[in-house]
Image (spheres, helix red, strand yellow):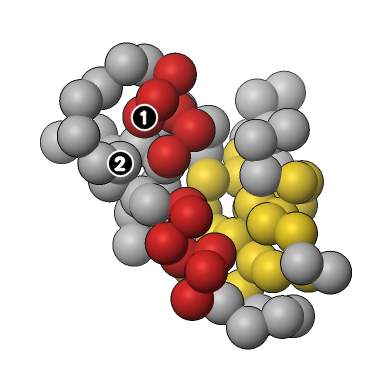
């Protein structure tokens, strides 16, 4: 079964709660900490999120070469 993060879940129009609830994970993080997702998002390739300067930063694969890059979540 494919898993989707909050953003991809809503973009695809799935009902109910996302498989990878980014808001819930982000709220649980202390400043400067990161957490690996339980699974990889099939939409954007998200594998981890962090709280940096109060912002949600996501580690996800770049579509151009499959490398992992930190970017603001949802960007």
Number of the label disc, if any, that sits on residue 42? none
Residue at 32% of width from left, 16% of height from top? 13
Q: Residues within 10 Å of mark 2 (few under 14, many from 20)?
A: some
Of the 4 image quadrants, the one containing the C terminus is: top right
Which image quarter: residue 55? Answer: bottom right
Residue at 54% of width from left, 64% of height from top? 26
Q: Residue 30, percent across and down? A: 63, 83
- Residue indicated by mark 2: 18
Marked residue nearer the N-terminal end (1 or 2) = 1
Residue 35 visible within the image: no
User: Which of 57 and 61 lies nearest the eye of the viewer?
Assistant: 57
Of the 4 image quadrants, the one containing the N terminus is: top left
Q: Residues within 10 Å of mark 1 (few under 14, many from 20)?
A: many
- Residue indicated by mark 1: 9
Q: Residue 40, percent across and down? A: 40, 47
Residue 32's place in the image compared with 61, above or below, is below
Q: Residue 37, percent across and down? A: 43, 61
Tell me, yes or no, whether the two marked residues, 1 and 2, touch with CB atoms within 8 Å: yes
């Amino acid at each position: 079964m494919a898993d989707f993060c909050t953003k991809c879940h809503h973009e695809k129009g799935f009902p109910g709660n996302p498989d990878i609830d980014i808001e819930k994970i982000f709220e649980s993080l202390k400043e400067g900490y990161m957490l690996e997702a339980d699974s990889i998002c099939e939409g954007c390739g998200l594998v981890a999120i962090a709280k940096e300067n109060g912002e949600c930063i996501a580690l996800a694969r770049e579509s151009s070469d499959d490398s992992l890059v930190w970017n603001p979540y949802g960007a």
